[in-house]
Amino acid sequence: MTTSASQYHEVYKSWLDDPEAFWGEAAKDVSWYKPWDSVLDAYSGQYGRWFSGAECNTAYNCLDRHVEAGLGDQPALIFDSPVTDTVKTFTYSELTDEVATLAAALVDLGVKTGDRVVIYMPMIPQAVMAMLACARIGAVHSVVFGGFAASELATRIDDAKPVAIVSASCGIEGSKVIPYKPLLDKAIELSQSKPSACLILQRPMAEASMIAGRDYDWLEVTTSLKERGRKAGPVAVKATDPLYILYTSGTTGQPKGVLRDNGGHMVALKWTMKNLYDIKPGEVFWVASDVGWVVGHSYICYAPLLHGATTLVYEGKPVGTPDAGAFWRVISQHKVASLFTAPTAFRAIKKEDPDGSFVGKYDMSCLRALFLAGERADPDTIKWAEAQLKVPVIDHWWQTETGWAIAGNPVGLGLLPIKYGSPTVAMPGYELHVLDEAGKPVAAGESGTIGIKLPLPPGNLPTLWGNDERFRESYLSQFEGYYSTSDAGYLDEDGYVYVMARTDDVINVAGHRLSTGQMEEVVATHPDVAECAVIGVADKLKGQLPAGFLVLNAGVTKDEKEIEAEVVKLVRAEIGPVAAFKNVMVVPRLPKTRSGKILRATMRKIADGEDWTAPATIDDPAILDEIQGVLSSRGMGA
Ligand code: COA
Ligand code: AMP
C-alpha cells in the first residue's frame, strides 16, 4: 500500500481555497439544460443553495445520456436474487425504456412534476426503476424501507402526501416471504392523506388482493403502454428542485424528512465515483445495502448510473442465502470491482465462517476495495476483512442528511495510510471542527461534537421537507455557523477523524438508524407501563441493540413476563421488525437526577459492562444497583 502518491491534500486544499471553483469544475461532468447563475447562492435557503438558476434532469444523466453516447448495450443494472434463483441484466437502453414506460404510467396515474410518490418495495430492480421514473418527470420520491410497520409507513404518507404509491406484493427476507400489500393497505387506512392510485408489482410468492379503482397492476399497465409505444421523456427541473425525501430517525417519533435536490446531488455523487471509490465507467460497483436507506439511494441507484458504471441489486443476505460464501459468489460471478456494505454484514459472515473457508472457493481477483459505512467499523472486523479479501478495507463516515461521505479514504486520489478506528479524513466540501459545548473548536485529540462548517457541500440536505424551522433547530441552532452532526468524536494531529458515539438518542442496529426516543413513546402507550427508558446496548453482531426498562403502574397484578412480551409485540407492530426490539425488563424504579432526568448514559455503561460511577446529581444511588441486579439476572452487564 503506497501512500506517498495521494493527491488528497492538494485536492482538499484546492477546494478549501475556492469551493465555488472546485464544484463549478466538478459540475462539468454533469449534463445541464441551462447553466447556473451562481455555483453557490449564499443568500438563498437555510445556508445557501448550490447551482441556483440551473436546469437539469437526474434520470436523463443516469440513463439517456449514456445511450446517446453509444453505451446503450452496456450493462446498467444486474439483478442477483438468490432467494428467487434469478440473475438478470438490464442494459442502459433496456433500463431507459423501462423507466420511460414507468414514467408514462405515473403520468397516467395523475402524477405531475413536484408531486410526491411513495415507494415501498423490496430489493428488486423495479424499486430503482420507480425512483428513476419519478426523477424523470420531476416527481419527488420517498422510499420507505420494507422493515417498517404500517404505522411508520402511515406517518411518512401523512408527511409527504403522495399522489401515488408504488409497491410490490411481497418482499423476501432470507427464507421468509413478507407480504407488503396488507401493510400498505393498513398504512393507507391509518393515514389522513390518501393517495389516489397505487401501482403494485405482483410477485408470484405472495400475490396481493387489489382494491378496484385505486390499485393498478404494474405488469398490465406497463405492457399496455409498451404495446402503444408510450413513454415519458425527461423534463427540465431546477437544480434546486427536490429529487427525493428520505425519512430518517430523529429524537422523537416524528421522523425527519431529509430533502435532496437535483443539481448539487448529481455533482457531488459523480465526483465521488472516481475520486473516492476509484470506479471507472463500465465497472461493476456493488452496494450491498437496501434502497430504503441513504446508501442505497446514493450508491445503488444514482451514483453508479450517473457515472456510466454497472450497479448491482442484490436480493439476499450475507449469510443464509444460501451460505456465508454468498458475497464472494456475487463478487466473482459479476466481476465486482468494489463492494460497499455495513460492518454488521461482515460480522455476520465472520460469525458463520470465522476461518473464511468459503473465500478460497471463488476467484475474487476482480475486487479492488471494500468500503464500510453506516456504523462505526470496529478494528477487529476491518482486520478480519483485510485478511480474507486482501484488498484495502475503507471505513467511511456519513449520514442520511449528507447523502455522501463526510470523511473517507479517497482511493481514487491515492490511498492515505489507514488508521484502524478512524474513517480517515474530511472529504473536499467538509471542513470539520470538534466543538465544545460553547461551540468553540477544541485541540487535536480532545473530544466533542463534530461540526461541519457552513455551508454544507452540494448533495447535502438543503432543509427538511416542509419544515425549515425543524431543520434549523435540529442542525444549525446548537453551534453558530456550523451544522451539528450529533456525532461525538475527535480529530488527531493528522486530521484523521474518530467518530465514537451519537450525542442524541439515535442508535445504530445492524446498520439501521433508529430512535430510542421513538421506542420509548411506543412503549409508554402500554396500559400497564408507568414510565420507561430505552437505551442502545453493545452487541457483537449488530453493533447495538435496544434494551427497554419498564416501571409498571402501582397495583398491576399481571405477570411481568406477559407484559414484557406484549411490549415487544407492540414495538414490532408500531415501528417494525427492523427495530429488533426483543430485550425488555421490568425494573422497580428508574435512576434519575434530582431534576428528574433519566440517567440513560449511566444505564448504558452498566449494561455494556463498562466502568461507571453514580453521577453527583443522582437522586437515589441505590437505584443503579437495582438496575445492575436486573441486568445481571438477564446475563447482561458483565
Ligand atoms: N422487509 C421486511 N422485514 C425486514 C427487512 C425488509 N426489507 N429487513 C429486515 N427485516 C426484518 C428481518 O427479517 C428481521 O425480522 P425478524 O425479527 O422476524 O427476524 C428484522 O427485520 C431485523 O432485521 P436485521 O436487524 O436486518 O437482521 P437480519 O438477521 O435479518 O439481518 C444482517 C442481519 C446483518 C444481515 C442485516 O441487518 C444487514 O445486511 N444489515 C446491513 C444494513 C445496511 O445495509 N445498512 C445501510 C448502511 S450501508
Ligand atoms: P444514517 O443516517 O442511517 O446513515 O446513520 C448515520 C449515523 O451512523 C451517523 O451519524 C453515525 O452515528 C453512524 N455512522 C455512519 N457511518 C459511520 C462510520 N463510518 N463510523 C462511525 N459512525 C458511523
Image (cartoon, rainbow, N blue to C red):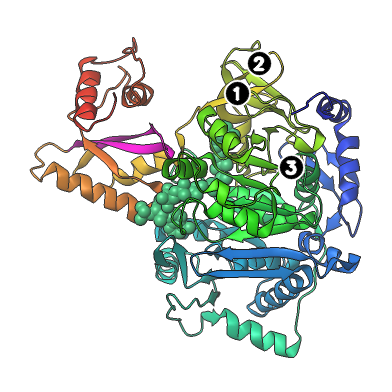
Q: Quadrant of ligand 2?
A: top right
Q: Is residue 465 visible?
A: no
- Mark 1 or mark 2: name the one nearer the start of the chain: 2
Span highlighted in magenta in the image: 531-552
- Mark 2 or mark 3: name the one nearer the start of the chain: 3
Residue that label 1 marks: 498
Q: Residues within 10 Å of mark 2 (few under 14, many from 20)?
A: some
537 in magenta: yes
- Mark 1 or mark 3: name the one nearer the start of the chain: 3
Q: Is residue 566 visible?
A: yes
379 in magenta: no
Residue 532 vs residue 149: left or right? left
Q: Nearer the viewer, mark 1 or mark 3?
A: 3
For the residue pair 356 and 444, the one nearer the viewer reads as: 356
Q: Give the spatial CA distance, label 1 vs label 2.
A: 8 Å
Circles 1 and 2: CB distance less than 8 Å?
A: yes
- Residue 276 is drawn in which quadrant? top right
Image x and y of residue 614, in percent: 31, 13
Residue at 69% x, 64% y is 77
209 lies above or below 389 = below
